[in-house]
Image (spheres, rainbow, N blue to C red):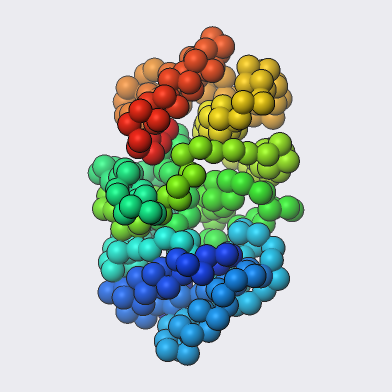
Amino acid sequence: MEPTAYAKRMSIVVPCYKTERYLPACLDSLMAQTLEDIEVICVNDGSPDGCLDIMRSYESRYADRIVVVDRENGGLMNARWSGIDVARGTYVGFVDSDDHVERTFAEKLYYAINSSNASMATCGFRRVDLDTGRELSREMCVARTPFLIEDDPGRIIEVNPAVWNKVYRMETIRAMHRPSQAPAILEDLVTDLLYYLAAERSGKTRPYVFVPRPLVNYMVRPDSMINTIEADQIESIRRTLVEVRALYVEEGASRHLLEALDTLAFVHLGISMSFRLSYDGNVDLASTMDETTGFLDESFPLWRTSPYVEAGYAMRHGTSYRRIHVACLAWKAHLMPALLSGYRLAIERTGRDIKW
């Protein structure tokens, strides 16, 4: 039975900043959704272009389905919170304003989470070259069995760290801790980690389910394959993830859940950040990775001995864990720069946005 405390089946929050070129296609795709009784909350995050005018135009045409929130610029995570605060849906999802979704995006995710009384539903997506329309890859499209965090916390590692291909329970997302300062990068990872904690704290055992169909078209901009990152951005996400881990400890998270969290810290602060930095010729990657190792050892100490980086777990749970296992071995053997060099070469030679 559906909860009756909410006026809509689902709310979809769309934060907008400097995306006037792409926003109409995004909103058109949301207005074409097959699921009835939804609302789309457009948050203008102080965008200096024509985003607000476009939102107001759609609001006037679809007054029963679009809500506009206009706020000063405060960053992506805070813009999403502004949408959550006014949302009226039983469930909530997010769509980036430069992407667009399939007509059944809301319907498939809604029925997945609602029929299973699940905590979260995750769908597949396409990565699409923005200029050519060429499909670069499909992800999260392989069938996965539902899981309970209580039974196997390591399964959260295989869930892609994004919010735009998921739907969440509204009462859980509103019960989440809000970080003292939003990070400059990896906001989605932080949101998902805080959601897992809030779901566990609720005391209700609910599964995490999957819809292995590409319902989101994630548009890759021309420069997305060559990633650069600033030192202050890395510092901001480190600070926030340390805060998240402290909350996990304070809330009494199990050792296995902490091991999963520390593994994710290695994957994102170690593998992902090192990959981005590897494109910067001014960075001494080896010394930077040594510094990162020290930080991980101090702040996320279970990453080295986590069962989720071991060969046995990788063999039982598939490709993504095997990659992490190999990366962990390479990292500990100080071979990661060579591995990343080969990874970059594969991307450049194939012209495909190969994701780790």
Q: Is residue 152 visible?
A: no
Q: Position of residue 161 (x, y in %)?
A: 48, 45
Q: Using the image as rendered, state which of residue 39 and residue 273 is in the foreground.
A: 273
Q: Is residue 261 above or below residue 161?
A: above
Q: Is residue 245 above or below residue 100?
A: above
Quick check: 189 above or below 121?
above
Where residue 180 sits: x, y (%)? 74, 53
Residue 305 visible (yes or no)? yes
Residue sitting at the far top: 333
Residue depicted at 61% across the width and 58% down the height = 77
Give left or right: position of 336 versus 37: right
The image quadrant that residue 333 belongs to is top right
The C terminus lies in quadrant: top left
Q: Along the horizontal axis of the image, is 136 left or right of 16?
A: left
Q: Is 119 or 75 nearer to us in this picture?
A: 75
- Report how many numbered discs are placed on residues in the image: 0
Instruction: Decide which of 29, 112 is in the foreground and name it.
Output: 29
Q: Residue at x 30, y 49 (%)?
A: 134
Placement of the N terminus among the 4 image quadrants: bottom left
Q: Residue at 46% of width from left, 39% of height from top?
A: 225
- Give the percent coordinates (x, y) of residue 335: 52, 12
Q: Position of residue 227 (x, y in %)?
A: 54, 38
Position above or below: 183 against 12: above
The residue sitting at 49% across, 15% down in the picture is 338
